[in-house]
Amino acid sequence: METASEGWARPGGDPAFAAVLTMRATPGDVPGAVLDFLEPGWGVEPLSSPSADQRRLLVRVDDEASLRRLLQLAGRRRGQVLGCADRLWAMSVGGRIQVRPRTPVSTAEDVVLVHGSGVARLAARIAAEPAVADVVTGRLNRVAVVSDGTAVLGLGDVGPLAALSVMEAKSALFAQLAGIDAVPVCLSATSAEELATVVLALAPMFGGINLDGVAAPRCIEVRRRLQDQLDIPVLHDPEHATVVVVLAALRNALRVVGKQLRGARIAVLGAGVVGTALTRLLLRSGAGDVLVWTPGGVLCAAAGGPLPAHEVWLAEHTNPRRVRGGLEQALHGADAVLGLSRSAALSRELLAAMAPGPIVFTLAESQSKIRQPHLAGLAAVLATRRPNAANQLTDAVVLPGLLRGAINARAPRISTAMLLAAADVVAGLVGEDRLSATVCCRTCWTLGSCRRWRRRSPRWRRPGADPGRTRTEGRFRMVQPMARRRCDESAAVPARGRVVHDAGASGPDSGAGAAR
């Protein structure tokens, strides 16, 4: 096995659009001459090669059109390029997940145990004692990843079949990082009522529900109904995972510029599902000066006028300085801006009006395309969804550990206390020695770091549980298993990390506003 030299590597491109080039290797090859057909800005990473006369390179480009050009250019170099394969396509053939038995079935007696009187005996016992199902089936560790395909990764309404590839990949993530048996459930449903009814009918099979790729406001209605009628956690990515990683990154970014959450002026651009849930979590975490901008202007209780119910709540609980106006007034003097609206066009002039050392999170699809040089010299800390950015904010940092902790603890729902504790953990994954303007949140999620997360993630335990009580009647106590230094703004979580959670309390209520 030969490994290509580092002289062949160069940064750039998007990992989602990458191809593996197999090239003929000859002594004295010069990278610039061999790769002269590649366009500027495309990234190159050397891979191990099976023989000395071959060289394998991973080429990352920016989009689908660039990937097609790369394949065409490689095809014109047949004497030099031995092969060119779309990496994502190759690794996705046959799907991302599969089902395998935990015990072998190799004899006639084994068949009796798994398909005859053996399993009939188990079924009879479960019918008499339903709680036994948690012991002799995989229900507790099985999660349904539910989608109707109406809002898939910024693509919009692509339908349940197209959503299947995304939910399969997400199921693989749960299995790899948290040991959860996740099952993609992509449904063709025409209403929130229909979608919720089907999931409720399937719920006895699962120990948790992950709702993803469902458009607003349907997603809010479905999440509310499922959580009201089920005693298992229902995790909705935008309301739970996304807001945790943003809060964690914001806390670390404020530490970089020497500010605290309680005294910082924070502008949230957008009052959709994420914007509303994030604002509520910011207020619960101790933020004292938060305002919310929508395409209609800054929300203000004194402004009056008809507003959706969730915007009325935001107007009454935010904007203590009673700021009025548009985007310019919202950003004036702000310490941090959290861009969640496609309608919010951030410019250098707007950012220049912010307080010294501004923190800029560009999280909407249109904003994520803003390049670092565009904000050079303005943003002290810049974070985005772009996979090749220094501070990439991805909910993959949160999803596996949060759901794993809820399942292990038999928590009946995802509560605000859990989200605050999870944000504390995620923020702490960046140590003092690594914290900087370009490292305010974990971006590389290896299996080793996930094991660390699972050791440090919030755990639930039921003190003095009464066997006569149902799961939803008990009181749960969440315990941080490992002590760590806490920031001043984390005072909302009591000392020693113990947070009492009433089983009847729900998570952050995000309202039914559509994403803007």
Image (cartoon, rainbow, N blue to C red):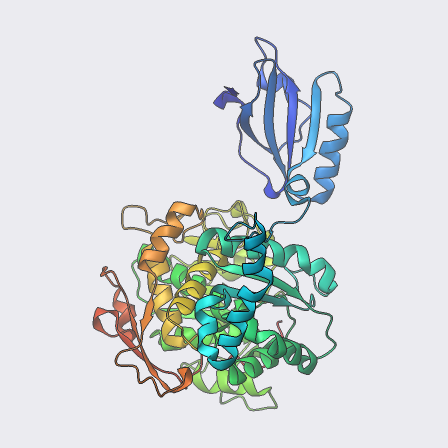
Say which residue appears at 29% left-offset and 50% top-offset: 431
Taking depth in this image into account, of 2 and 313 the one nearest to the observer is 2
Quarter of image, res 29: top right
Say which residue appears at 62% left-offset and 65% top-offset: 342
Quarter of image, res 171: bottom right
In percent of width and height, residue 440 lies at 38, 53
Left or right of 257, for residue 512: right
How many numbered marks have been drawn onto this rendered protein structure?
0
In percent of width and height, residue 216 lies at 63, 75
Taking depth in this image into account, of 65 and 461 the one nearest to the observer is 461
In percent of width and height, residue 99 lies at 59, 53
Q: In which quarter of the image is the C terminus?
A: bottom right
Quarter of image, res 250: bottom left
In percent of width and height, residue 461 lies at 31, 73
Q: Can residue 9 be seen in this view?
A: yes
Taking depth in this image into account, of 376 and 230 the one nearest to the observer is 230
Left or right of 1, for residue 167: right
Left or right of 357, for residue 326: right
Residue 51, placed above or below residue 73: above
Left or right of 105, for residue 357: left
Say which residue appears at 56% left-offset and 37% top-offset: 12
Q: Is residue 270 visible?
A: no
Say which residue appears at 75% left-offset and 21% top-offset: 77
